[in-house]
Image (cartoon, helix red, strand yellow):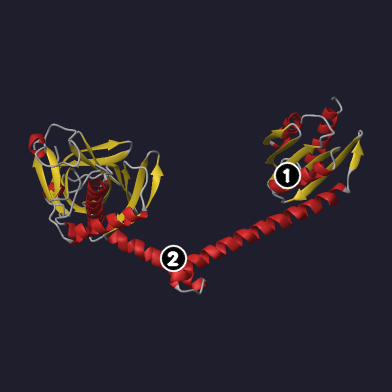
């Protein structure tokens, strides 16, 4: 079994050791060492990264007691010098210990037990056995957590038998009977945990709650600790400064001003939509002026250039509403593809779906709809006018059978 130096000293970032064996899994070369300072993924905490003899370590996992270091290329040497990425390691130490403190406060003060924990790249989250969270609880819990951090309480780790560990007021019952590693923040948290932690809570620096969402019957609480708090603050300040450069208002008034702008934009969008609908209605009337009577059926057939399918649908609906005896064929030429709408007024009979299915193979197309109204599209293997003509011929043939 690999000797785990990160348990002896989580601050150790360099070490010398011997290769125990090498291997490959799913075309990824890996190496097993006699001892390692690299933490493998586990308990919600991601793995360390770094290098072995200058070769990048991209993943670390524990398999049957041995720690596998996955490399960007095979390593031939039998002696190695390992270097752990300290910034990533310390970030994980801050986030993980902040989670311990937050989970302890949420359970002890509000009766909300942590069900799961996820340490992400930018933020951290815990799932709580609760239905919701109030702003008052969020504010109060954040203050309590930061008070514990500022008190710089010592963080202890001990390997104990399950019997010895059960003498402590554990956060949750042990799931194993063998020796367990206990992480202790006196009078705050007593928890079986295999992660890396700093020596004192002050190194967590600070914790900021970022919000919560419902996840089925649980609450997912998102937060950040340590240097991530500064990064979050910097990112938000950058965004806020950009808004201030565009909207010349005091910072305290920005939220209301942005809300006003959003409401104005929604109102303008609504007005634009209404005007577009009016324009399409006028356009429909103009297009209807070019109707032809073929086989006793009023046919409206047009090829439009680069028109979105929604525009074709609106035009066709306007036409069939005003002229219930009309067969409408609209094709949009989109350069690389064709889109179409085939519709009939309520005075006519015939299944437009069946007609479209007969013609769509010509453009390797797909589509569908109701018996009186279908839409679809495909490749431009025909010119728009040719395809429109095929639609007309097929529609008239089918409709004259009814």
Is residue 34 visible in this depiction of the protein?
A: no
Residue 118: x %, y % from top left:
31, 45
Mark yes or no: residue 327 visible. Answer: yes
Numbered marks: total = 2
Q: Do the residues labelled 2 and 1 touch (CB within 8 Å)?
A: no
Q: Which residue is drawn at 9% across and 42% down?
A: 159
Pointer 1 local density, CA inside 10 Å: few below 14, some 14–19, many at least 20: some
Which quarter of the rendering shows the C terminus? Answer: top right
Q: Is mark 2 on a helix, strand or loop?
A: helix
Q: Could you say where residue 267 lies in the image, as x and y percent from the top left?
A: 63, 60
Image disc number at residue 41: none
**Side of 280 relative to 151 (left or right):** right
Would you place residue 242 above or below residue 228 in this image? below
Furthest residue in direction top, as rendered: 401
Q: Pick whichever, 48 or 336, lies toward us.
A: 48
**From the viewer's perspective, is residue 399 above or below residue 72?**
above
Q: Tell me residue 310's x, y (percent).
A: 69, 47
| Residue 306 in the figure: left or right of residue 52 | right
Res 390 → quadrant: top right
Tell me the element at label 1: helix
Q: How crowded is mark 2: few (under 14 residues within 10 Å), some or many (20 or more)?
A: few
Q: Mark 2 points at which residue?
A: 239
Label 1: which residue? Answer: 313
Q: Earlier in the sequence, mark 2 or mark 1?
A: 2
Q: Could you tell me which quadrant the N terminus lies in? A: top left
Residue drawn at point x = 31 percent, y = 61 percent: 229
């Amino acid at each position: 079994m690999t000797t785990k130096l990160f348990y002896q000293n989580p601050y150790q970032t360099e070490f010398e050791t011997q290769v125990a064996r090498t291997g490959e899994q799913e075309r990824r070369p890996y190496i097993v060492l006699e001892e390692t300072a690299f933490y493998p993924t586990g308990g919600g905490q991601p793995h360390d990264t770094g290098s072995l003899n200058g070769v990048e370590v991209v993943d670390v996992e524990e398999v049957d007691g041995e720690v596998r270091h996955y490399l960007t290329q095979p390593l031939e040497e039998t002696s190695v010098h390992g270097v752990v990425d300290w910034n990533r390691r310390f970030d994980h130490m801050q986030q993980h210990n902040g989670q311990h403190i937050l989970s302890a406060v949420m359970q002890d003060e509000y009766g909300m037990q942590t069900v799961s924990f996820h340490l992400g790249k930018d933020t951290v989250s815990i799932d709580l056995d609760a239905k919701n969270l109030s702003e008052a609880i969020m504010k109060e819990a954040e203050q309590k957590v930061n008070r514990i951090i500022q008190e710089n309480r010592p963080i202890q780790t001990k390997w104990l038998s399950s019997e010895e560990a059960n003498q402590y007021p554990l956060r949750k019952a042990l799931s194993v009977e063998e020796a367990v590693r206990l992480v202790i923040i006196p009078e705050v948290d007593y928890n079986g945990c295999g992660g890396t932690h700093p020596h004192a809570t002050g190194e967590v620096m600070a914790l900021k709650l970022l919000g919560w969402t419902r996840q089925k019957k649980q609450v997912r609480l998102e937060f950040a600790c340590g240097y991530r708090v500064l990064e979050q603050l910097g990112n938000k300040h950058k965004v806020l400064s950009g808004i201030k450069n565009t909207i010349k208002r005091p910072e305290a008034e920005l939220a209301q001003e942005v809300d006003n702008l959003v409401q104005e934009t929604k109102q303008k969008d609504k007005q634009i939509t209404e005007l577009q609908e009016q324009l399409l209605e006028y356009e429909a009337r103009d297009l209807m002026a070019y109707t032809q009577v073929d086989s006793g059926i009023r046919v409206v057939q047009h090829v439009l250039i680069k028109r979105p399918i929604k525009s074709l649908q609106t035009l066709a609906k306007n036409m069939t509403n005003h002229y219930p005896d009309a067969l409408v064929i609209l094709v949009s030429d989109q350069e690389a593809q064709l889109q179409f709408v085939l519709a009939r007024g309520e005075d006519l009979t015939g299944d437009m779906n069946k007609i479209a299915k007969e013609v769509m193979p010509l453009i390797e197309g797909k589509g569908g709809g109701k018996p009186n109204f279908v839409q679809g599209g495909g490749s431009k293997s025909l010119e728009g006018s040719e395809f429109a003509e095929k639609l007309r011929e097929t529609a008239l043939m089918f409709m004259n059978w009814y």
